Image: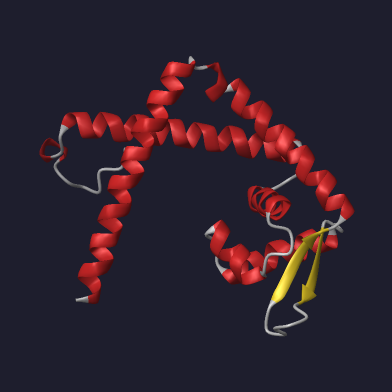
Amino acid sequence: MVSCNTDMNEVDPLNQDLFRSFRTAFLLHQRLMEKALADSGSQPAEAMCLCALASHDGISQRDLADRLHLSRPRVTQVLQELERGDLVIRQVDDIDQRLTRVHLSHEGRHRSRELHRVFKELLDRTIGEMPAAERAELTRLLDSLASHTARVLEDDAEGARQ
């Protein structure tokens, strides 16, 4: 765990243990996901983009960037790569010419289904191996952590506006 040269005696040991466990699980899962995607010939950002388009075909490029929590220039780069692979089609919006809409091509739909299969297999092999009661409890706990964290972010944003 990164300590930033602070005295870790000031941090609750249970908080330290929980953060270490959370971070380790997250990083290991991320590495496994990146390996599974690489084995299937994809990069994480491309896979996220294709999966988002599978459920939001025709989304504006700007909204896609917001949905993926990626910068607009990064989404442009990813889409250019996907276009070169004939996986997506970008079109100027008929009504608002300032917007670019992104659609999956036939090949892109096929690829997104393949990525969905890879993701499902990965989840089945990792999280799916846990008993249902533990998965439900972990979901509840992580939702609680997310809620607390979102509240801190909102409080910080509110404080910055004042």
Residue drawn at x 57%, y 57% is 68
- View extreme (left): residue: 10
Q: Residue at x 73, y 83 (%)?
A: 95
Residue sitting at x 30%, y 58%: 153
Task: Name the residue at the front extreme.
Answer: 95
Q: Quadrant of the N terminus?
A: top left
Q: Position of residue 23 (x, y in %)?
A: 39, 36
Q: Nearer the viewer, residue 72 or 150?
A: 150
Label total for image: 0
Position above or below: 22 against 98: above
**Foreground of the two, 94 or 44:** 94
Residue 63, percent across and down? 60, 67
Give left or right: position of 106 versus 132: right
Residue 111: image quadrant is: top right
Chosen colour scheme:
secondary structure
Quarter holding the C terminus is: bottom left
Extreme residue in the top direction? 131
Relative depth, front residue between 9 and 12: 12
Residue 149 in view of the camera: yes
Residue 157, quarter of the rendered image: bottom left
Vertical side of 78 occupied by 72: above or below: below
Left or right relative to 77: residue 22: left
- Please say if 106 is above or below 66: above
Pinpoint residue 69: horizontal percent, then vertical percent.
Answer: 52, 59
Q: Position of residue 2 (x, y in %)?
A: 30, 42
Residue at the limit of the structure toward the bottom, as seen here: 97
Q: Based on the displayed image, in which of its 4 quarters is residue 88 positioned? A: bottom right
Q: Is residue 41 visible?
A: no
Q: Is residue 134 left or right of residue 101?
A: left
